[in-house]
Image (tube, helix red, strand yellow):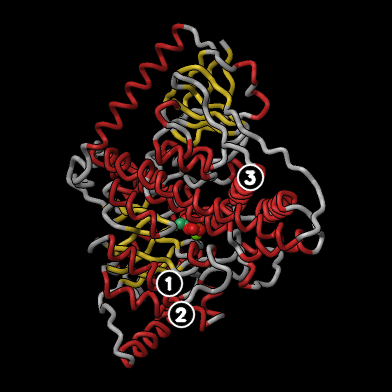
Amino acid sequence: MITIQGKGVSTGIGMGPLYFYRRATADIKFYTVEDTDAEWQRFKDAQAVAIEQLGELAEKAREEAGDDAAFLFETHQMMAEDMDYEESIEGIIKEEKLNAEIAVSRTSDQFAEMFASMDDSYMQARAADVKDVSSRIIAILCGVVQGGIASDVPVLLAADDLAPSETIQLDKSKILGFVTSYGSGSSHTAILARTMGIPAIVGMGDSLKMEYEGRSVIVDGGTGAVVIDPDEETRERMMKKHEEQLAFQKMLETLKGQENETKDGQKIRVYCNIGSPEDVHSVLANDGDGIGLFRSEFLYLNSKTYPTEDEQFEAYKAVLSDMDGREVVIRTCDIGADKQIDYFELPKEENPAMGMRALRISLSRLDFFRTQLRALYRASAYGRLGIMFPMVTSVWEVRETKKLIESVKAELREEGIPYSDHVEIGIMIETPAAAVMSDRLAKEVDFFSCGTNDLTQYTLACDRQNNDLGRFYDPHHPAVLRLIKMVVENAHKNGIWVGICGELGADLEMTETFLAIGVDELSVSPRAVLPLRNAIRNTDMSEKRAKILEALDSDDTQHLR
Ligand code: PEP
Ligand code: MG
């Protein structure tokens, strides 16, 4: 028996023979062309076929894995006809007089390198997408047929890395799990695996060897363990775990439509964090009570220039309408720090996390801010909207923002454009300054939402992007928890509600602490809703509440961990 370790990115247990993905590779020839117009046309024809294939894949993905997965292939379609991408290919064909395969291949390397060098992990993962789209076009140019699984029995599929389009084209009835040498938790393959409920482990590196092919293997997508030739005891243990997970999943399904209420009657709202309008279906599928954080950055990240008021309005309206009366809190643009966008032309900073980001940009570029506020207020007529502002440190920022809101509303009234009078205005508590000033800030707004990812970063002076900091970045740190407790007390004294929308909200080790403190709402990823509801329903706070509060005020907060 051999055990090798990777990173589990999609939970579940898979057992079966290991099989390496067969990739039909195109043999890219290098040659010069005389008739560059004809060569350009050859590229255009291949591009058209690729776009058609991607459209079919989008439909297949929609049926098998929902709108999120389909959106991926629609994004690939856009990438295939991206203007900069086309221009680069055209330049190589027409100016350097090289063949289309080489032009696509070089352009692909160049774009992938550009994405890979970005700070944002989401943008880095886009390098795989541009390579995927380009391989498709090259395969069409070379007349290569796509690869797949030539096995009659279901297998655990191994690969160096799987492109999203390779994942979706696979016959799912033949796959028990994924194991890859490379890839990350935010790659689309990992996202697709999670959506489809298939266990997946990435980052095995060199430990994943061809010689394991055909051998009996068990993968645990929760722990990242891959066991080759398991002994009887391991097999039985994993089988038992598998059955327990299936039973747990089945039980979670029965919680849909149930209250988030403890045994002693304390209620808390469980909302969802989303990053694009396509995510609404998983909010509804997981029975989220509302949306507590809609990160509006997707609009800016997916665009080549500032999205227009109408584009923003359509996106916000779609989410509000689809949520059908459930509350939707949209956060205004949080660009800067780890999320850089070229067309914003932000000055290079020594210390971007502490620099021009989020509300600071909005308040420094009023036209840009007004456009987003107008779009939000126009959309407010279509549902129950809350708007919140990121990275607040001072009362004046909130007052200035509220003034701007009033002038936007006056403008809409003058233009006869309808908007709701019941929009809730809130701020994120992400800086120690906002937490310390929460008694004053609470008089200005309708709600607070604690962004614990940044609140931890700024309170502990610990870069959230730096994996090397490990245990120093500790969201359970008493300093963070005491700040949250103080924020909740100040909010409640002033009659407003408080939520948690950072990753900590879904941390089941913290659920009882948040209940004890009196947090009103937890906003988590859609898949975390039902496990959280289960934890809430299974606890009785009547005896725990006082003990937890006492521990928070004493020196001994270790037991909370
Ligand atoms: C946070 O900081 O906790 C948060 C929710 O915002 P983001 O992760 O988008 O910075
Ligand atoms: Mg934040």
Amino acid type, residue under disc 3 in the picture: Ser
- Expressed as whole percent of the image width and height from the top left, the position of residue 310 reads 42, 76
Disc sitting over residue 142 in the figure: none
Residue 371, numbered circle: 2
Q: Looking at the picture, how far across and down is residue 535, in whole percent?
A: 29, 38
**Mark 1 residue crowding within 10 angstroms, few (<14) / some (14–19) / many (20+):** many
| Separation of marks 3 and 2 at Cα, in angstroms | 39 Å
- Quarter of the N terminus within the rendering: top right
Mark 2 neighbour density, 10 Å: few (under 14) some (14–19) many (20 or more):
some
Measured from the top left, where is residue 281 in percent x and y? Answer: 32, 52
Between the residue at mark 1 and the residue at mark 2, the CA separation in whole angstroms equals 9 Å
Badge 3 crowding class, 10 Å Cα cut-off, few under 14, some 14 to 19, many 20 or more, is: many
For this view, does 318 lie left or right of residue 163? left
- Numbered mark located on residue 135 in the image: 3
In contact (CB < 8 Å): disc 1 and disc 2: yes
Q: Measuring 34% from the left and 74% from the top, which residue is drawn there?
A: 443
Q: Is 241 situated left or right of 307 in this image?
A: left
Rendered residue at 46%/17% (across/down): 16
Residue on which the image places disc 1: 312
Q: What residue type is labelled 2?
A: Thr
Q: In which quadrant is the C terminus drawn?
A: top left
Sequence order check, earlier mark of 3 and 1: 3
Mark nearer the viewer, 1 or 2: 1
Q: In this view, does 267 lie above or below 214?
A: below
